[in-house]
Each structure stands twice: as C-alpha cells, then as structure tokens.
Image (cartoon, grey):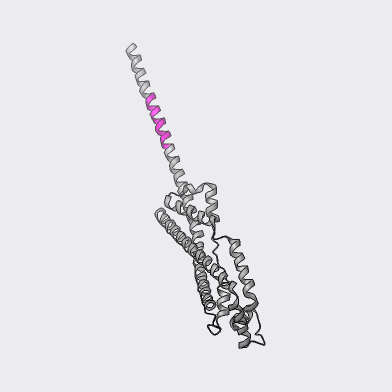
Amino acid sequence: MKLLSEGKTGKYFKYAIGEIVLVVIGILIALSINNWNQYSNDREKEVAILKELKKEFEENSIRYKETIEAQTFTIKSNQSFMDCLEKKNLNYKRDSIGYFIMYGPLNYYKAEPVIGAYQSINASGNISLIQNSELKSKLAAFDSEISQGFEDESSSMSLLNLLHVEVSPILEPLLTTEIRERVGLKQPQNMDVEYQNNALLKLYENQNILSLVLIRSQMENNRLMLQRKMLTYTDEIIELINNELNTKN
C-alpha cells in the first residue's frame, strides 16, 4: 500500500509540474503575442508619423528654395545699387537704379517653415516611436535652429524703415515705367532728364544711404547662409524619412 501511495504521489507531482510548465508556457506565449501586437502597433504609428513629417518637410523644402531664389535676386539688386552709390555717376545705369532700389534694399524675404506636426509629435512623446536615432537628432537640430531664429527681427525691420525714410523722397522720379504701372503710378508730367538728375544728385549726396545699404547687405547675406543651411537640414531629413519608409513597406 505504501509503495502504491508513493507511486500515486509521484504521478501527481509530475502532473502538477506539467501543469505549471503549461501555464508558464501559456503566459510566455501570451506575453510574446502582446509584445508583438504592441510592436506592430508602434510601427504602424511610426509610419503614420513619418508620413506626416515627410509632408511637412517637403513643404519646408519648397519654401526655402523659393525664398533662397528670391533673396539671391534681392542681394544682386542690392549690390547693383551699391555700385551706383559708389560711382556717383549720373549716367551710370540711370534707367535701372529705381529698379535696383525697389528690388534690392527695399525688399525683404524670410522663409517661414512649418513645424507644427513635429512639435505636436514631440510634445506628445510619440517622437520616441521613431527608431532612427540620426533622424531624431536631425529633427531636434532643425527645431533648435528655428527656435533661435534669424537675426534680430526688430533690428532688421528698423533698418528697413530707415532705408524707406532716406530713399522715399527721391525714389519716385527714378522708377521705370514698368514699376510705375505695377504699383499703379501714372507717368509724371515733368519726367525729364533734369528732374531725374536732381533726384540722383540728392541720392548720391546722402551718405547715410550707402551705410544703411551696406548693413542691410550683410544682414541679407547672413540670412541667406542660414536659410541654405536650413534647406540642407530639410533635404537630409526628407532623405532619412524616405529611407525609413522604404524599409518599413
């Protein structure tokens, strides 16, 4: 009887161990399935985030390229105007000087990037779903540059206003017919050589204008370099996003 009882106990013990093993295996399988489902959901969310960021940065790329093109033209016009101011020759590019003024020192371009999607994703903590560490680093660097901003905006606007004050009194006689028509001005009755010469003499006698234009030129070149830098960031981010999306499809 004792041996029989010990045999039953042994069988029961083995049965119990088997049950425990099955329970553990079941728990591990359930955890594995749950982890896989969580991983799968995270990857789906990551793809959605990447697509949202791609759309935003493709728009930024367009904005930077357009602004850089326009600003490059502005800087060239600014340089042409400075050439006129340095030569002080009444006949040097007299038919174009009004054009140089309007599209040079009196022009202002700055790209306004969109980063709403990135900031929202970052604030929600979902930025952690992005697995590519290089991409996250580039996004953070881009956001940091935008937060710092360009040169002091108020100084730039103050300089632009000063140029308007100095140039406005002599600008009208120097405007080309094309510009006058574009801004809705009629041709003056007394538009002759002497009328333009008087305006040019006042322009060349004003020492403040060249100094202001030189400062403005430096600001524009600094902004242009920064916007080119931001375009490089933008295009690198787009490339990284595309690479990630390709690996996840």
Question: What's the magenta region?
Answer: 16-29
Residue furthest right in the image:
189
Count of marks, rendered view: 0
Residue 21, can we see it?
yes
Quarter assignment of residue 13? top left
x, y percent for residue 221:
50, 66
Q: In the picture provided, is 56 more to the left or to the right than 170?
A: left
- Quadrant occupied by the C terminus: bottom left
x, y percent for residue 238:
45, 59
Q: Nearer the viewer, residue 15 or 208?
A: 208
Q: Is residue 71 above or below residue 4?
A: below
Residue furthest left in the image:
3
Q: Nearer the viewer, residue 67 or 192?
A: 192
Q: In the picture provided, is 71 more to the left or to the right than 169?
A: left
Q: Residue at x 57, y 60 (%)?
A: 152
Q: In the picture provided, is 102 more to the left or to the right than 45?
A: right
